[in-house]
Image (cartoon, rainbow, N blue to C red):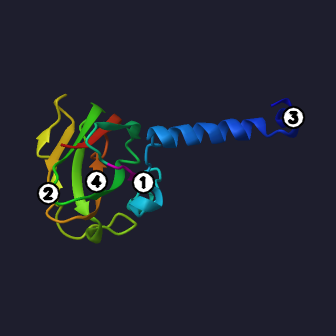
Amino acid sequence: MSALKKLGLAPILVALAFVTACSFLGVKKESTGGASAGQKSGDGSTPAKAIVIVPETTLKSRANLAINTTDNVRWFYMKLQSGKKYYFETFGNGDPDAYVYHKSQVKGDGTISGDAVVMNQDDGRQGNNARIIFSPSKTGEYYLKILLFAGRAWSGKLDYRIQ
């Protein structure tokens, strides 16, 4: 090993051993969506820069979301399957609304055609947050839009999962 240290290869071998052990044990890196989800994750300011989320059966959170009075929207991109029930809920201060759109309804600049597939059916558990529970009628790519009305600010998190 000392010869490997002199050559600077020890860290590479340690990393390779770690990756091999994780693979053997079935440990997976949490997916950020990326190319497999059809879009790279961004800051959420527009659909083209949507934050990619990958709902699974275990509860996931996207924390540290801030929406202010001049930047009143956050977009999330996801692939959903028909026949499965999905849960999305915001937690934080403020009173956001939430909408789900099929990808075919949304342009990169945020222009929307048609009504939302679903919008928050009920305020969240904290009273002033949004909650959506729904089953898409078709498998495909969707956007979740969290929106505040002018003059308000919100900071919090989005919880999501397959129920």
Discs 3, 2 touching: Cβ within 8 Å: no
Graded by Cα atoms within 10 Å as few (under 14), some (14 to 19) or many (20 or more), the crowding at tag 2 reads few
**CA distance for labels 1 and 2:** 21 Å
Q: Earlier in the sequence, mark 3 or mark 1?
A: 3
Cα separation, mark 3 vs mark 4, equals 54 Å
Q: Is residue 68 left or right of residue 22?
A: left
Labels 3 and 1 touching (C-beta < 8 A): no
State the separation of the CA atoms marked 3 and 2.
57 Å
Going from the N terminus, do you reach mark 2 or mark 4 first?
2
Tag 4 or tag 1, which sits nearer the N-term?
A: 1
Q: Position of residue 144 (x, y in %)?
A: 28, 53
Q: In which quadrant is the N terminus drawn?
A: top right
Q: What residue is shown with label 2?
A: 83
Amino acid tagged 1: Gly
Label 3, secondary structure: give it: helix
Q: Which residue appears at 19% of the width and 69% of the height?
A: 114
Name the residue type under label 3.
Ala
For the residue labelled by badge 4, is the local secondary structure a helix, a strand or a loop? strand
Left or right of 51? Residue 8 is right
Q: Are marks 1 and 2 in contact (CB under 8 Å)?
A: no
- Which of the labelled discs sits on residue 144, or is there none? 4
Q: Which residues are magenta?
A: 50-54
Q: Tell me the mark number nearer the camera, choosing from 1 and 2.
A: 2
Give the spatial CA distance, label 1 vs label 4. 15 Å
Residue 33, numbered circle: 1
Between discs 3 and 4, the one toward the N terminus = 3
Q: Residue at x 46, y 61 (%)?
A: 35
Q: Viewer-nearest of labels 3 and 1?
A: 3
Q: Which mark is residue 3?
A: 3
Tell me, yes or no, whether the highlighted magenta stretch contains residue 132.
Answer: no
Q: Residue furthest left?
A: 121
Q: Earlier in the sequence, mark 3 or mark 2?
A: 3
